[in-house]
Image (tube, helix red, strand yellow):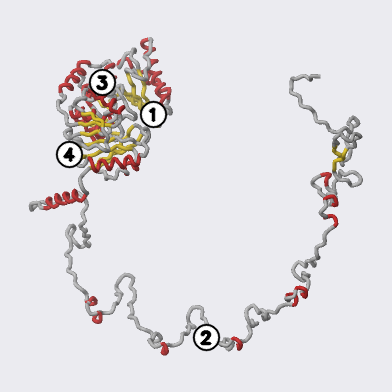
Amino acid sequence: METAKTTMIAKTLTGLEGVLASELSALGAENVTPQNRAVEFEGNTELMYKINLWSRTALSILKPVFDFTFETQEQYYEILRAYEWDELFDVEKTIAINAIAFNSEFTNSLFLAQRTKDAVADYFTEKAGKRPSVDLEDPQIKLNIYINGDMCSVSLDSSGAPLFKRGYRRKNVQAPLNEVLAAGLIMLSGWDKKKPFYDPMCGSATFSIEAAMMALNMAPSIFRRHFSFQHWKDYDPELWESLREQARKEELKRVPPIIASDINNNAMDAARTNLMEAGLLGRVKLEKKDFFTSKPTHPRGMLILNPPYGLRLQTEDIHNYYKEIGTALKHNFTGFDAWIISPDKALTHKIGLRHTSQTMVYNGQLECRFLGYELYEGTKKTHKTEADTDTDSSENQPEGKEKHFDGPTTERRSYGKPGDVQGEQRERKPYRRSDSNKDNPEERKPYRRSTSGHGNKPERKPYRKPDSNTDNPEERKPYRRSTSGPGNKPERKPYRRSDNNTDNPEERKPYRRSTSGSDNKPERKSYGRSDSNKDNPEERKPYRRSTSGPGNKPERKPYVQRDDRSDNPRDKKPYGERANKNKGYKGEGSAFRKEGNKPYKREEKNSDNSGEKRSFRKQDSRPEKRTENKTDRPFKKKEFRKPGRRNDE
């Protein structure tokens, strides 16, 4: 048996690093260091076998082979080809490469895996004359390549298939839960393996099976038959079989109440098959009932839910669905500790309960929150009163011992002056009422601002009522604007009523604009009706526009109908009076007009036969450009013939 200790890495899911670190320490690992989705530890071959058998939250266990640096892709290939791979496994084994690269010469992980496979295959071809086969589904040897910059780490995956494949799942439902995630969530909930465990939305019973295996101290990988380390050259079958036999002997016989239920028939069928495969059908109670209408048979316990997210499992009203979950928890499961996993914060808000714990985990590619709720009867005030009672009892401590406070207090801190001793509070002087704050207002001293304060402001003078603000209006002095102020405005004269503002309208003088103003406008004349605006229309003068106005427009003449604008269209003169230089021969200024200034028109063809329909031809007014071959025959439409068809004539 190998006793040398090596550094190994256990891979896990996001959010379960702390749980896996505690689990590895309990199994005997040393120098445990949690990392991002992994935990680094030290151990020997026996510990590696034991972790593969007992770990509930690890995905795979990696054993490092060697590390190296490289600069180019060709150098990377030569280093891998030179390594002696036949010391690790035989050429008959099937292999698969899992490669990851960051900030490296390799920008494609598939190409990196291909180059790694070529290097390993070329080594065996040169050494043994044949090369190992590649099996991506179920390989016997699984290589792990991790590159960060120019640093490469080559490891052997001792687990082979991921450890969440326990071996008991025979039937699935839609959106099944990962076994590693289910076990990690149960550990995060703090279940003591004694309280009743309820799984009311069991699906394929993953939560119930993992909880039963924990309570019975059953190894999670006891049902697995194949591991990748079994195909290594240094595999110790006797050590592995002894660990399996020891695991079977450590199993317990009793299990706390574990109730799995669901309303779906397919889910009940899958749960029953998986429980039977795990040998837990009689130890886990399986029931078909509705979570929203059923009540638990135990007063206290733990409940864990994986409700639909509304993504793969569609629900008609997902928000109302979560609201009903909160109502059922509040009324039917009082006294329980409930835990719910969900990816949507808006959905968990609809539950209407305040969570006491929260952990971020990943369910596949979905970022989820694992929330814990403390369900109690009544309101939060009862629990707050109990907490206050515990606090009061802690204050009655024996003399000589100091009080310790876990959190911030409401006590006001005292910051002494520079002369005070640090840590000692100054003596607070008793409150003494000043002389100015006496009960009798007449005995109070007038307020005076101290000149010794900040800014050395002058003393505030007492208020003195001016002489002009007397109670008797007759004694008040007339208002006069001071000439010493800004702008030196003249004194405002008192208002004096003019003579024309008499009460009698007949005595008032006619309005005349003063010519002494700023604009010197002439006097406005009174309105008088002109001769043209007389009541009798016959006496009015005809309207004539003045020629003295702006623009000097001529006088408007009365409308007279023209001869060429009669209602009869035949009396109208032909169009063409104005020149149109842009439209060729149609205008008067066109250069393409015939003699006689005749416009463009159609001429009728004289026919001897009165019954024959007259045809028209165009008579061009432009200069003739016809050839001698052209005739004056009327235009005849050409008949259409389909291509490739002969004439019947």
Q: Quick one: 354 or 394, which is closer to the camera? A: 354
Q: Which residue is mark 4?
A: 299
Residue 390 lies left or right of residue 494; in this view the side is: left
First in residue order: circle 3 vs circle 2: 3
Q: Nearer the viewer, residue 197 or 99?
A: 197
Q: Secondary structure at mark 1?
A: strand
**CA–CA distance between discs 4 and 2?**
96 Å
Amino acid carrying label 2: it is Tyr
Marks 4/1: CA–CA distance = 53 Å
Query: Dot 1 surroundings within 10 Å: few (below 14), some, or many (20 or more)?
Result: some
The tag on residue 224 is 3
Residue situated in front as seen by the camera: 102 or 308: 308
Q: Nearer the viewer, residue 433 or 232?
A: 433
Residue 287 image-quadrant placement = top left
- Counting residues from the start of the chain, the first of labels 4 and 3 encountered is 3
Within-10-Å neighbours for mark 2: few <14, some 14–19, many 20+: few
Q: Quadrant of residue 182?
A: top left
Tell me which amino acid carries mark 1: Ala
Residue 250 location in percent, x, y? 15, 24
- Against 375, is 268 above or below? above
Residue 393 shown left or right of residue 84 in the figure: left
Q: Earlier in the sequence, mark 4 or mark 2?
A: 4
Q: Earlier in the sequence, mark 4 or mark 1?
A: 1
65 relative to 560, above or below: above
